[in-house]
Image (cartoon, rainbow, N blue to C red):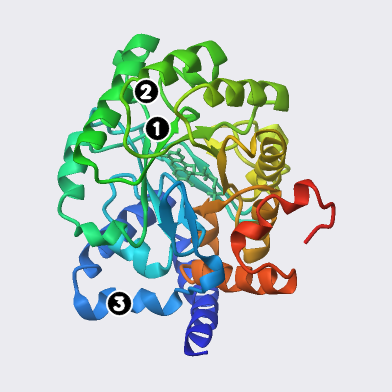
Amino acid sequence: MIKRVVRRTTKQVYKHAIKPVLFKQHPDNVHKHLIKVAKHTQRIPAVKRLPKLWAYQAPCLEQTILGLHFKNPVGLAAGFDKDIEMAPTIKNVGFGWMTGGSVTAQPCRGNPKPWFYRLPQSKSLVVHAGLPSDGIVAILQHLATYPASLFTSMPLAVSVAKTNSKETALDEQGITDYCESLRLLNIQNHCQLYEINISCPNAFGGEPFTDPERLEKLLAAIDSLKLHSPVFLKMPIDKPWLEFRELLQVASEHNIQGVTIGNLLKDRSAAHLSEPLPDEIQGSLSGKPTRQISTELIRQTYREFSDRFVIIGVGGIFSAHDAYKKIRAGASLVALITGMIFEGPQLIGEINAGLESYLKRDGFGNIHEAVGVDTHDKKGV
Ligand SMILES: Cc1cc2nc3c(=O)[nH]c(=O)nc-3n(C[C@H](O)[C@H](O)[C@H](O)COP(=O)(O)O)c2cc1C
């Protein structure tokens, strides 16, 4: 009851007082300052527990997937905590799991700034960060400073991409680069899931591994690493179903346990934006424009590959309703970034509380019973 009041109050304060101030500043600066504040406050005992007031847990939201226990299905998507600096804060906010990264083998400054541009009416961000990363060695040193218990109650997925540089442009070098990060992560054994980001639209050399033959080579190399943790593939959402399916087919022949659907939207003409997007703003779209495309790809993937892949649903989740639609389409877990930026940090607890209500309404005892029901039951939510 108290937590519900806190979530509602935070929602109003965020909407009417905090967001108007934040949205007057450049999103690159807001993101940079947020990381600084989180890194500082998550070390102060009295302050670090405050975000817990937004969190929401219920037995019907708990699942064990691929041997990992998730207290709730709502995770942080790749890209918000690139160097895995805010994990304690992310846990306290109420996420059931998080994706760190994308990390790369070599340190990289990313694309020249600006990286981000807001489209408030379209509920979207234009992203052109280009995989900035401290590099895997620095990130592993950093990960080692966290207590092991942090990630036993909030599984950590690490998203791995290839370093954004000329040196990794050839396939062979690109593959070596992915494998170097994965090899070091596997030795240190700090993370519970790997996510292979083949679909970063904003990097040097484009997305070579969204081509089936080249993906085959990358995944064969990853197979030979004999990774200890489950491996997910982060999928592009711009491909027509038959091409998307071809990539799934390739992945199904390798050591890949799941797919994350999906990444940013490159095709602006598919976005139905509510405001003009100047041509000089480079980048791909997050948030609402990705919502329906990703949900449909989840649905089709579940129909054909539900016995082969676990699906993580990502793209345009701003409410429990959006998350539940992805779950009913076939996602066992969901993840978000843009929804939290637009709606506030209490959104995670709101989604979990809302999911519990939807499960009760529809007569499901646990979230896993709702996964994929819309692929055989045409009733919407
Ligand atoms: C600020 C920002 C940075 C991102 N960086 C990455 C990244 O490094 N790696 C990645 O796989 N996806 C990245 N993404 C894509 C997100 O993980 C996600 O797929 C996409 O934003 C759709 O989810 P959303 O609508 O909840 O934001 C980024 C997205 C945003 C908004």
Q: Is residue 185 above or below residue 162?
A: below
Residue plotted at (48% across, 23% down) = 254
- Residue placed under numbered mark 1 in the picture: 130
Where residue 343 sits in the image (x, y, percent)? 55, 66
* Disc 3, SS: loop
Residue 248 versus residue 271 in the image, above or below: above
Furthest residue in direction right, as rendered: 378
Residue appearing at x 65%, y 59% in the figure: 369
Viewer can see residue 10? yes
Q: Earlier in the sequence, mark 3 or mark 1?
A: 3
Residue at the disc numbered 2? 222
Q: How far apart in space, not on screen, are marks 3 and 1 (Cα)?
A: 33 Å
The residue that mark 3 highlights is: 49
> Residue 318, can we see it?
no
Foreground of the two, 42 or 62:
62
Q: Are marks 1 and 2 in contact (CB under 8 Å)?
A: no
Nearest-to-viewer mark from 3 and 2: 2
Front residue (pair 24, 196): 196
Which callout, 3 or 2, points at the residue further toward the start of the chain? 3
User: Which numbered marker is on residue 239?
Assistant: none
Q: Are marks 3 and 2 in contact (CB under 8 Å)?
A: no
Badge 1 element: loop
Q: Is residue 183 left or right of residue 93?
A: left
Amino acid, disc 2: Ile
Q: Residue at x 43, y 45 (%)?
A: 78
Disc 3 to disc 2, how far (Cα)?
A: 39 Å
> Looking at this view, is 252 or 38 the one in front?
252
**Quadrant location of the C terminus in the rendered image:** bottom right
